[in-house]
Image (spheres, grey):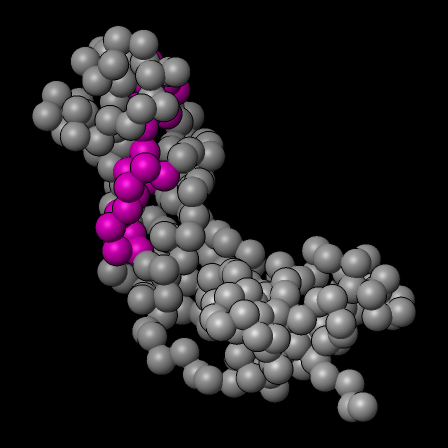
Amino acid sequence: MEQRFCQSCDMPLVEGNIGTNSDGSKSKDYCGYCYKGGAFLQDFNMSQMIEFCTQFTDQINKETGWNLTPQQAKAQMQQIFPTLKRWKEKDERSLIEKAIHLLSQCKEVTLASVNAEGFPRPVPLDKIHSLGCNEVWAVTAADSEKVADFRLNPKAGLSYSFYGDSVALRGTVEIITDDVTRKRMWQEYFINYFPAGPADSNYVLIRFIGNEATIWINREFVHITI
C-alpha cells in the first residue's frame, strides 16, 4: 500500500496516529497531532507550523527512522510544506490583518521604555487588551521603573511574536490612572498584585499605540507607517 503523509505536517500516516473527521471516521489526509473531530488542533499559518514541528524533531526521528537535526528537519519542512493540501490554498488576508491575528495569539508582549540615561529598557508584560495590530494595554505598578521612564519620555517600542512570526512597533505610551478605566479593565488575578482592588493607588494601566511597524509573518516582510 502506498505510504500516505499528513497534509498538514508531513508525518507518515500509520495506524494509531490518524486524525478523525467530525463524524468520527478516520481522516484520509491528516494525522491526529494536527486534526481531530473535523478541526485543526493548532491555529497556525505555515511558517508557525514549521516552527512548532521543529521542536519535535526527536519524536519525528523516532517515528520515522530518520536521523535529522532540527536545522535539517526545518529545511526539509520549508521545502515540503508548500506542497501539502493544508498550505496550498493562499491566505488572502492583508499583512495588517495577519498582524492583528498574530497579536490575538500572544499573551505576552515586550515593551521598551527609554530611561533617564537614554538607554532602552525592555520588559515582558502580560497583554490584557489589544485593538488592531498596534494598540496594546498592560497593567503595572505606579511605582515601577518603567512608569517613571514613561512619565519622563512617552516614546516606546513594543514587540510580539508567536512561533517565528513577529511584529515590532515604535510609538508612545499613555499612563492611565482614572478610576472609571481602571475599574473597567480590572481582572480578578490583579488582586495578587494590588490587594486594595481597582482603587489601589499603585494600580495603573499602560496604553501603547504604535505608529510604525515592522511585520514579519509567514515569510512576508514589510515596514510601514500606521
Q: Which is nearer the eye, 161 or 214?
A: 161
Residue sitting farthest toward the top? 196
At 41% from the left and 78% from the top, the residue drawn is 91
Does the magenta portion include 151?
yes
Q: Is residue 143 visible?
A: yes
The answer to whether residue 117 is above or below residue 98 is above
In percent of the image, x 70 and y 55: which residue is there?
Answer: 55
> x, y percentage for residue 6?
66, 76
* Residue 142 x/y as whole percent: 29, 17
Residues shaded magenta: 127-156
Horizontal side, residue 210 vs residue 49: left or right: left
| Quadrant location, the C terminus | bottom left
Instruction: Name the quarter where the N terminus is drawn.
Output: bottom right
In which image quadrant can residue 114 be found? top left
Residue drawn where x is 33% and y is 59% of the image: 100
Would you place residue 30 above or below residue 58 in this image?
below
**Does the magenta-highlighted stretch encompass residue 167?**
no
The vertical placement of 99 against 89, above or below, is: above
Tell me if 180 is positioned left or right of 81 in this view: left
Can residue 119 be seen by looking at this rendering? no
Residue 223, how many percent across, how many down?
38, 65
Say which of 218 and 30 sits in front: 30
Judge left or right: residue 76 versus residue 151.
Answer: right
Between 209 and 184, the one nearer to me in the picture: 184
Residue located at (42% from left, 33% from top): 125
Most extreme residue toward the bottom is: 2
* Residue 159 picture location, percent across and down: 43, 47
